[in-house]
Image (cartoon, coloured by chain):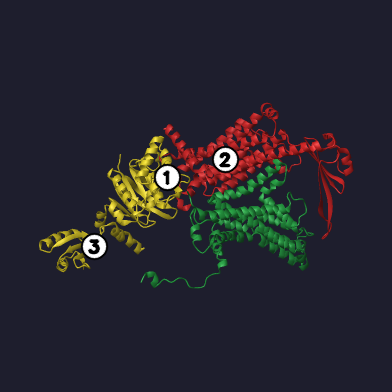
Chain colours: A red, B yellow, C green
């Protein structure tokens, strides 16, 4: 019997792959998954270009410059003082800003932006009316900084939005979409237990979501790391827990697909318009930090956040609400997080099984 | 194992709307046609049999199985529904093959059964084209193929001849007949009454969610007492025959046929009338043929369902 | 004689003007629009904030109201660009929710059920079809955006006098065009997404995703690329920048107003392109 069930599950997965997962109308899910890859790739290419530009600028100064030279420039200095300290700027941009001086009168304020580089960092000096009005030093990127930025993008864009909406699109299609296509009855007229059908469809959806989004995570990390040389990458991977972070990100992605998949499969079975529960889940997940302790446990993001390997540092100047969203005030151990997420998912799937056994086909009311 | 499809006091309500009410049926092997106006409950009955909807009351059994046991039931039941949609992205071959895989068959068996079913409906050349690109008739045929690919013992067909050209209709009807000869239950619904007449062993007439009549069509006709039987008699002396039959109190109407070579008679007691014909034939009037003209589905439909529609 | 030649005659009466035929779609959509109780209640609730603003304007001009309460008070509202920026922000959020109710069901059911053929085999062009569907959203959303906004402006004008109105007529312009940009963008986006996916539900999900994911992606771009150009992906931010420009707000917007306008126009163009590709009488599948 179990062998038959397994054959039937495989048959359902095969059918779903043929029917749905490489269809044109799923294109937006692929775009959603590839958007952050494109972003990190763009970052790498821009940074490589910037490094080249900085190197060229450093060759054009009258003498090699250091960070101390940059630190000596401050607001209020004149152009001549800056040039005396650093030499003529390798790159300079001049213009005039239109400023409103009265209800119907305007004036032109000349400005200049000078750029210097020591090969790694870049000094940008803004001058207005011949005096320094602003100084900024950008040091280029470091892998440490980039890992925090990746962690932020992963937690706040990829997990909460990309995987959320991607799973919504994939899992909602499995039952509700087939109802709208008027093709669900073909499954119900096959000698398959409805519970087996549900398992098969869920696994098909989970496989597709996992492949799409774990590939995206892997490509994002490759795009990010390709900016750095092999020594830096080796140090990060082997000495700074890089591999464990990579595995953790992939694991969190897989678990997110399990969790959100179970929610949206159930929503597709229970609600004629699953958008309403999707919005409610989105709000529920967003409000997780401010929920009471017991209610927090009925949320996927509660478990997923604790499994994310890098905690995003809270900036003291950050708005309190954003700080609350970012900080994980009640972290739980990895084992409890995995167990909790799987338990909630299994409970939701068990409820879905009961629902699918009572499912009736009435396309005319859809 | 029982050989019948049984409806035991089955009712289905969609909220306040009646689907079917108090249906008691026992369907034997052979070709059974479900006949009725739109909205009479034919599709509801078929969906109830196959578990696509659940009865509000009553029980359904197909052989010794219920619709709650799809893993057993659909090994012997095939259903070609009225829904014209097909799963997206599949060719005709893939459509039949993929759903056969759900039976747990191996790839070779699935392939053989698929081609056999596709050949039965004459779609071999178009089998590898996307099903979404098929014409209406081709979609109907491929759905038929899918429903009978696994050699079911019960074939439920909701308007299976829709969209088929006359040649394919004839071939499909011949297919149903051959399946029925092999002992299958073929239950189909149709609005084309003359075809129902030709192919059906028994009919079930429905109207307004109720079963109005069921059984062999001649038997059903004989039960309709309030509609005298209409008989056409071809003879050489119709006027003389008319004067003879007018003497009988069970004859309610006699009309000479337009070609003046026959009589159209309405009688409330057809059995006594046929005995009378024997006597008349011995008296010298040459009778060429005696045939009832209203013991077909069309007439029964009009008497039973047509009058109901009028009285509403 | 054939039956149709005996009694049938073609219609020989007056015809409605050809230019207004697309409004037929609006009239029919209006009948079904408010069948949903939730949608109707929400539509009514959308007038709550303008009503509150109206009461605020009145109280602001009739401070003697507070003397009955034993309180001395000065004007508590500054009726300027900032006031109407808040008004537009609140009403734009409500109009987004209303669009999520109405928009997805406009085109996708016609495509899914093959009804587009029925429309286009009448003397109705694809352009008129799109205009008709757009008009459903534009007219409905106008009732909760620029119409109450202009009412507030004229009420304030009547309370403050002709001189105030003459000096601040640019506010009325800003309310009108600012609202129009937002509701036109919403309408085109929801129609385009509805035409693309052919499912009402998926279209609704995509509409949500476009705004939420767009905003999230904008933040991600800004963080990764250390720039502010990421806001080009945040539709609500772009429109907010346009409003700030129209309502002459001080402060440094994250993007130049001209750039925001160009981005919005490009998005509208993409929506139009998608609509023209998808709105066809028949789809050929090979």
Disc on res. B92: 1
Residue B105 visible somewhere in the drawing: no
Q: Is residue A279 above or below residue C146?
A: above
Q: Chain of mark 1?
A: B
Q: Check if mark 3 and mark 2 are on a common chain.
A: no
Q: Chain of mark 2?
A: A
SS class, disc 2: helix
Name the mark on residue A77: none
Assign the N terminus of chain A to one quadrant of the image: top left
Whether residue A140 is visible here, answered yes or no, is yes
Q: Which mark is nearer the camera, 2 or 1?
A: 1
Helix, strand or loop at mark 3: loop
The residue beneath circle 3 is B228
Q: CA distance from mark 2 to mark 1?
A: 34 Å
Mark nearer the viewer, 1 or 3: 1
Q: CA distance from mark 1 to mark 3?
A: 51 Å
**Coordinates of residue B210 in the picture (x, y in percent):** 35, 55
In the picture, the disc for residue A260 is 2
> Residue C236's spot in the image, x, y percent?
67, 51
Q: Position of residue A303 (x, y in %)?
A: 61, 36
């Amino acid at each position: 019997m179990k062998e038959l069930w397994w054959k039937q599950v495989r048959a359902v997965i095969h059918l779903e792959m043929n029917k749905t997962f490489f269809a044109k109308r799923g294109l937006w899910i692929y775009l959603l998954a590839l958007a952050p890859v494109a972003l990190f790739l763009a970052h790498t290419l821009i940074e490589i270009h910037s490094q080249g530009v900085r190197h060229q600028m450093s060759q054009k100064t009258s003498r090699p410059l250091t960070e101390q030279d940059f630190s000596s420039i401050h607001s209020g200095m004149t152009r001549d003082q800056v040039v005396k300290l650093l030499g003529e700027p390798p790159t300079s941009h001049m213009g005039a800003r239109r400023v409103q001086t009265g209800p119907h009168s305007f004036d032109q304020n000349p400005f200049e932006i000078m750029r210097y580089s020591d090969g790694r960092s870049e000094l940008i000096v803004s001058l207005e009316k011949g005096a320094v009005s602003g100084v900024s030093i950008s040091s280029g990127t470091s892998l440490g900084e980039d890992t925090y930025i990746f962690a932020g993008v992963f937690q706040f864009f990829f997990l909460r939005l990309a995987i959320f909406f991607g799973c919504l699109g994939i899992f909602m299609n499995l039952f509700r979409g087939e109802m709208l296509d008027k093709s669900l009855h073909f499954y119900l007229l096959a000698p398959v237990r409805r519970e087996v059908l549900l398992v098969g469809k869920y696994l098909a959806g989970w496989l597709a979501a996992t492949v799409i989004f774990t590939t995206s995570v892997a490509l994002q990390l490759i795009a990010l790391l390709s900016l750095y040389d092999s020594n830096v990458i080796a140090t990060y991977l082997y000495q700074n827990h890089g591999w464990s972070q990579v595995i953790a990100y992939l694991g969190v992605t897989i678990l997110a697909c399990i969790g959100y998949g179970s929610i949206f499969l159930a929503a597709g079975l229970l609600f004629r318009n699953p958008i309403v529960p999707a919005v409610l889940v989105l709000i529920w997940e967003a409000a997780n930090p401010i929920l009471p302790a017991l209610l927090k446990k009925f949320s996927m993001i509660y478990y997923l956040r604790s499994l994310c390997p890098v905690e995003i540092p809270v900036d003291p100047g950050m708005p309190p609400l954003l700080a609350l969203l970012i900080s994980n005030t009640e972290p739980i151990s990895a084992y409890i997080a995995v167990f909790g997420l799987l338990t909630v998912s299994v409970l939701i799937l068990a409820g879905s099984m009961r629902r699918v056994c009572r499912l009736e086909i009435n396309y005319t009311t859809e | 194992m029982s050989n019948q499809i049984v409806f035991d006091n089955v009712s289905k309500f969609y909220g306040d709307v009646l689907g079917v009410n108090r249906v008691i049926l026992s369907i034997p092997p052979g070709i059974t046609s479900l006949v009725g106006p739109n909205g009479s409950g034919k599709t509801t009955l078929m969906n109830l049999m196959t578990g696509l909807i659940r009865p509000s009351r009553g029980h359904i059994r197909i052989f010794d199985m219920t619709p709650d046991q799809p893993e057993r039931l659909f090994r012997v039941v095939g259903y070609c529904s009225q829904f014209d949609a097909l799963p997206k992205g599949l060719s005709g071959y893939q459509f039949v093959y993929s759903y056969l895989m759900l039976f747990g068959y191996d790839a070779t068996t699935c392939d053989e059964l698929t081609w056999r079913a596709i050949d039965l409906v004459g779609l071999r050349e178009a089998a590898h084209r996307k099903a979404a690109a098929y014409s209406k008739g081709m979609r109907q045929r491929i759905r038929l193929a899918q429903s009978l690919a696994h050699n079911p013992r019960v074939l439920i067909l909701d308007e299976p001849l829709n969209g088929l050209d006359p040649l394919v209709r004839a071939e499909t009807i011949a297919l149903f007949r051959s399946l029925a000869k092999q002992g299958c239950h073929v239950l189909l619904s149709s609005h084309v009454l003359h075809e129902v007449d030709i192919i059906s062993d028994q009919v079930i007439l429905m109207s307004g969610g109720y079963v109005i009549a069921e059984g062999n069509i001649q038997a059903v006709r004989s039960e309709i007492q309030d509609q005298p039987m209409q008989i056409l008699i071809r003879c050489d002396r119709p006027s003389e025959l008319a004067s003879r039959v007018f003497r009988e109190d069970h004859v309610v109407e006699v009309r000479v046929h337009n070609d003046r070579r026959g009589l159209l008679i309405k009688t409330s007691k057809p059995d006594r009338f046929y005995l009378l014909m024997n006597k008349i034939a011995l008296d010298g009037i040459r009778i060429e043929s005696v045939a009832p003209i209203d013991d077909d589905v069309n007439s029964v439909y009009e008497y039973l369902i047509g009058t109901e529609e009028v009285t509403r | 004689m054939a039956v149709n030649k005996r009694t049938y005659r073609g219609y020989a009466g007056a015809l409605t003007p050809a230019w207004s035929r697309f409004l037929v779609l609006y009239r029919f959509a209006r009948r079904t629009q408010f069948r949903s109780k939730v949608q109707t209640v929400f539509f009514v609730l959308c007038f709550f904030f303008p009503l509150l603003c109206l009461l605020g304007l009145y109280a602001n001009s009739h401070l003697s109201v507070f003397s009955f309460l034993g309180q001395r008070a000065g004007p508590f509202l500054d009726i300027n660009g900032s006031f109407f920026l808040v008004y537009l922000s609140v009403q734009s959020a409500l109009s987004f929710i209303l669009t999520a109710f109405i928009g997805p069901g406009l085109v996708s059911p016609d495509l899914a059920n093959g009804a587009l053929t029925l429309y286009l085999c009448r003397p109705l062009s694809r352009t008129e079809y799109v205009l008709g569907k757009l008009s459903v959203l534009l007219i409905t959303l106008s009732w909760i955006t620029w119409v109450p906004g202009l009412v507030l402006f004229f009420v304030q004008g009547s309370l403050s006098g002709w001189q105030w109105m003459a000096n601040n007529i640019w506010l009325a312009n800003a309310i009108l065009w600012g609202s129009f940009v937002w509701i036109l963008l919403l309408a085109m986006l929801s129609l385009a997404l509805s035409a693309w996916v052919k499912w009402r539900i998926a279209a609704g999900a995509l509409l949500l995703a476009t705004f939420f994911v767009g905003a999230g992606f904008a933040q991600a771009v800004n963080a990764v690329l250390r720039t502010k150009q990421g806001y080009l992906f945040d539709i609500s931010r772009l429109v907010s920048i346009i409003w700030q420009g129209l309502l002459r707000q001080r402060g440094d917007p994250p993007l130049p107003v001209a750039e925001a306008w160009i981005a919005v126009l490009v998005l509208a163009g993409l929506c139009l392109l998608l609509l023209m590709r998808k709105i066809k009488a028949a789809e050929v599948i090979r």
